[in-house]
Amino acid sequence: MGKQATVSAAAYTLYLKAMGGIVDGPDRIRRLDEAIALDPNFALAYAMKARTMANLMRFGLLRGSEQEQIVLNYAEKALSIDPDLIEPHLALATSMNLTGDA
């Protein structure tokens, strides 16, 4: 049986809401921030936040080298929490592609 993604049902609900339907970037980030606040070891939430921020940067909605480092930090945090999940690896690859390190 697989490892539980989070110990917080509320954090998982926020994660699912961030993932579902048409949710704009800032709202998705807000929901993921809330999920991370409820469970600081929620690797999926960190990974999705990294990917969301990277996509916002790709479309010019977030800018700056400090933002690139933040995206990389979230991806690495997700990976440090659960290196067996695919999502943190995808987040890291997305962030490295953004910075040209891929």
Image (cartoon, helix red, strand yellow):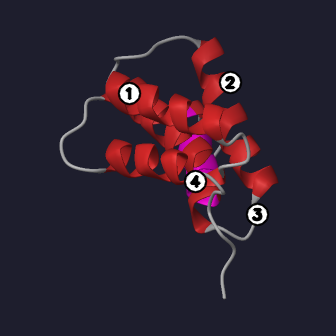
- Disc 2 versus disc 4: distance between alpha carbons? 19 Å
Residue at coordinates 60% horizontally, 24% vertically from top-left? 68
* Rendered location of residue 38, percent (x, y): 62, 37
- Highlighted magenta segment, given as a residue range: 89-98
Q: CA distance from mark 2 to mark 1?
A: 14 Å
Residue 97 lies in the magenta stretch: yes
Residue identified by numbered label 2:
69
Question: In this rendering, is residue 56 above or below 11?
Answer: above
Sequence-first disc among 1 and 3: 1
Which residue is tagged 4?
44
The residue that mark 1 highlights is: 56
3 or 4: mark nearer the eye:
4
Please indicate, yes or no, whether residue 50 appears anywhere in the rendered image.
Answer: yes
Q: CA distance from mark 1 to mark 3?
A: 25 Å
Kind of residue sitting beneath label 3: Pro
Q: Earlier in the sequence, mark 1 or mark 4?
A: 4
Tell me the amino acid under the disc marked 1: Leu
Please tell me how crowded label 3 is: few (under 14), some (14-19), or many (20+) other residues with Cα within 10 Å. Answer: some
Which residue has dot 3 on it? Answer: 83
